[in-house]
Amino acid sequence: MTDARWTAVDAYFSDRLVPEDEALQAALRVSREAGLPPINVAPNQGKLLHLIAQIQGARRILEVGTLGGYSTIWLGRALPDDGHLVSLEADPRHADVARGNLAHAGLAGRTEVRLGPALDTLAALVEEGAEPFDLVFIDADKPNNPHYLEWALKLTRRGSVIIGDNVVRGGAVVDGDAADPTVRGVRDFLELMGRNPRLSATAVQTVGAKGYDGFSLARVIA
Ligand code: SAH
Ligand code: DHB
Ligand code: MG
């Protein structure tokens, strides 16, 4: 479901509020030329992630699902000079493209793309005693969202923020009988979030250039 007006309004907002520079545009161009799917966040969503990271004062950011590094650039640019971002990606081609795009954006020193299924790389982060992350952006394979939330809780502290992308599934998220594993994954993710006394959470529906979608936002409160 998309609407020309949603796209026009996104363009209107972005033209005024979300200047995209050469590095962001290059990241999308290079990703497209490499044949990556165009499922990056929209520019105004990327800017929202950037602003939330800054409001949060995030020094350490964890992303699950890098693709070509478009959202990674928005998040990485919110970090102070001594900040660090780890982004997890299973597809070696995506990871390669993302590393190039991050280097081109001048973020090679502050960002790290770890290759492998996120369930493995998340376990490795815990195993190596990684310091808590201040913000986690979950945006990979949706069936694993409940697991990603559990790992995120091991890798955060009181006050950390956990954001989940694409929680609407075209509205199918309300369908308790859904067979679609992405719907089931998102439902279980939201259910866990609502039940967990360590989290205070909400979710918001959105429309825009990427159609009808939405995101969840949670704060670790204990
Ligand atoms: N955050 C990106 C978009 C990510 S798209 C942006 O907004 O710019 C989802 C990404 O998750 C894809 O690159 C896909 O290869 C990756 N992915 C899928 N399954 C994964 C898994 N099990 N572990 C890690 N990454 C995975
Ligand atoms: C898909 C994945 C995403 O993370 C997204 O933002 C949009 C679409 C997908 O797998 O189709
Ligand atoms: Mg997404």
Image (cartoon, rainbow, N blue to C red):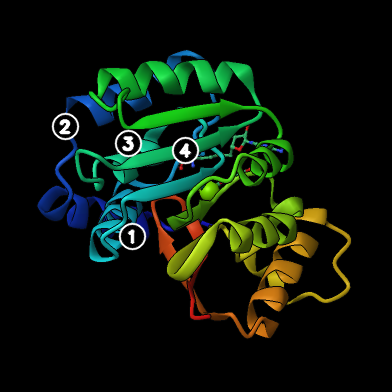
Report crowding for label 1: few under 14, some 14 to 19, many 20 or more residues within 10 A (C-alpha). Answer: few
For marks 1 and 3, the one nearer the N-term is: 1
- Contact check, label 1 and label 2, Cβ < 8 Å: no
Give the residue displayed 19% in from the left and 57% down from the top: 13
Instruction: Please tell me whether mark 4 sits on a helix, a strand or a loop.
Output: strand
Q: Residue at x 65, y 69 (%)?
A: 171
The residue that disc 2 covers is 21
- Residue flagged by tag 1: what amino acid is it? Arg
Judged from the image, the secondary structure of the residue bearing numbered disc 1 is helix
- Cα–Cα span, label 1 and label 3: 28 Å
Residue linked to disc 1: 5
Three-letter code for the amino acid on which mark 2 is drawn? Asp
Quadrant of ligand 1 in image: top right
Report x, y in % for residue 220.
50, 74
> What residue would you read off at disc 3?
73
Closer to the camera, 149 or 26?
A: 149
Disc 1 versus disc 4: distance between alpha carbons? 36 Å
Q: Please say if the residues under marks 2 and 4 sit with CB atoms less than 8 Å apart.
A: no
Q: Quadrant of residue 145?
A: bottom right
**Percent of width and height locating residue 31:** 44, 21
Tell me the tag on residue 86.
4
In front of the other: label 2 or label 4?
4
The disc, 1 or 4, on the residue closer to the chain's N-terminal end is: 1
- At mark 3, the secondary structure is helix
Are the residues tagged 1 and 3 within 8 Å (C-beta)? no
In the image, 61 versus 155, the foreground residue is 155
Note whether ligand 1 is within 8 Å of mark 2.
no
Q: Amino acid at mark 3?
A: Ile
Q: Which mark is residue 219?
A: none
Observer-side mark, 1 or 4, equals 4
Q: Secondary structure at mark 2?
A: loop
Q: Are marks 2 and 3 in contact (CB under 8 Å)?
A: no
